[in-house]
Amino acid sequence: MKTIGVAELKAHLSRELRRVTAGEFIIVTDHSRAVAVLGPLPTGLTVVRPAAGPLVLPDVSPLILSDPMDHLAAERGER
């Protein structure tokens, strides 16, 4: 497993990502302290992307057009 400092990773990111794509794991260090591991994604992992826009639902008409409290009172026999 290769170890690389943050500054070197920033300078050679594309090269290091090619290594990761080939299956290699890379330990990233910051001031000689390990802070991350770069590695290939597990097979079968689904990457979720943000939606292209908001979900717009069609307008629906209400099931009950009158006051719901009237229906509740009728069910209780309070009319």
Image (cartoon, rainbow, N blue to C red):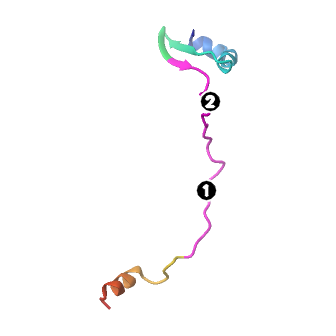
- Decide if residue 75 is on the left or right side of residue 13: left
Q: Residue at x 61, y 14 (%)?
A: 9
Image quarter in which the N terminus is found = top right
Q: Residue at x 61, y 37 (%)?
A: 46
For the stretch drawn in magenta, what is the main secondary structure? loop
Q: Residue at x 42, y 82 (%)?
A: 67
Residue that carries the numbered disc 2 in the rendered image: 43
Q: Nearer the viewer, mark 1 or mark 2?
A: 2
Measured as percent of width and height from the top left, residue 57 is found at 60, 63
In reply to whether residue 56 is colored magenta, the answer given is yes
In reply to whether residue 53 is colored magenta, the answer given is yes
Q: Which residues are magenta?
A: 36-61
- Report the front residue among 32 and 19: 19
- Report the front residue among 79 and 31: 79
Measured as percent of width and height from the top left, residue 27 is found at 54, 14
Measured as percent of width and height from the top left, residue 64 is found at 48, 80
Q: Secondary structure at mark 2?
A: loop
Q: Secondary structure at mark 1?
A: loop
Mark 1 residue crowding within 10 angstroms, few (<14) / some (14–19) / many (20+): few
Q: Quadrant of residue 56?
A: bottom right
Name the kind of residue labelled 2 in the image: Thr
Q: Which mark is residue 47?
A: none
Residue that carries the numbered disc 1 in the rendered image: 55
Q: Quadrant of residue 76?
A: bottom left
Relative to 61, is 22 above or below?
above
